[in-house]
Image (cartoon, rainbow, N blue to C red):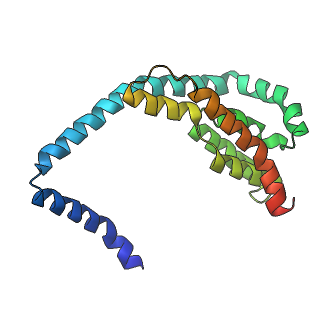
Amino acid sequence: MDKIGVYLVPCIIALILLFGFFRKVPLFDTFLDGAKEGLRSTVSIAPALVGLITAVTMLKASGALDLFTAAVRPLAQALGLPPEVVPLTLLRPVSGSGSMALLNGIFADCGPDSFAGRVAAVMMGSTETTFYAIAVYFGAVGIKKTRHTIPAALSADLVSFLTSALAVRLFFRM
């Protein structure tokens, strides 16, 4: 089984090259065109990413995340969420790396098999970095107005946050 995995990617690349060769596709020129398009996409989304990263860093450094977490904590507890995951619910739609750091902190403080650790893991697996994804994908194709995308995506995140504790309770009898 291991030997198949080692040869799978080179075989797929060879098949693509052979297919292109037999179809008389200018392979190197096509590759260069694709690389140019990739660079254009990278340049077009860079300002949105820089702004997003700056905003997340400022939010964490200013202490605003801690203040907002303290304000939302009683509501989260009333909804059955462990207080340790409240910062994760606030940061997950904005930053993947920031929420990963929070997840690691929850694992270190509470343990991965604790209720809070399992709820945090389910949250990470069932939600998306909404604003990052919108910045990257919409920016890559030049969409300026998000219309219903952000409310719909944040609603899906909210449902995932709220049902994660329920799912852990049901599947792990906690």
Query: Which residue is nearer to you in this view: 144 or 121?
Result: 144
Question: Looking at this view, is 158 or 2 the one in front?
Answer: 158
Side of 82 relative to 30 (left or right): right
Please determine whether, in this image, residue 156 is positioned above or below residue 28.
above
Q: Residue at x 53, y 28 (%)?
A: 53
Residue 40, by quadrant, is top left
Say which of 148 and 27 sits in front: 148
Residue 99 rendering spot, x and y as whole percentages:
64, 40
Compared with residue 147, is residue 102 higher up or lower down, i.e. above or below?
below
The residue lying at 45 percent from left, 29 percent from top is 138
Does any portion of residue 174 appear in the rendered image?
yes
Q: In the shown orientation, is residue 45 left or right of residue 24? A: right
44 lies above or below 28: above
User: Residue 93: horizontal and vertical position, in percent?
Assistant: 62, 34
Q: Quadrant of the C terminus?
A: bottom right
Q: Nearer the viewer, residue 67 or 152?
A: 152
> Is 59 situated left or right of 134 in this image?
right
Q: Position of residue 166 (x, y in %)?
A: 82, 51
Rendering quarter of residue 77: top right
Q: In the image, residue 124 lies at what x, y percent?
A: 65, 47
Q: What's the residue at 19%, 39% (across, down)?
A: 33
The answer to whether residue 110 shows anywhere in this view is no
**Residue at the spot 73% in from the left edge and 48% down from the top edge:** 120
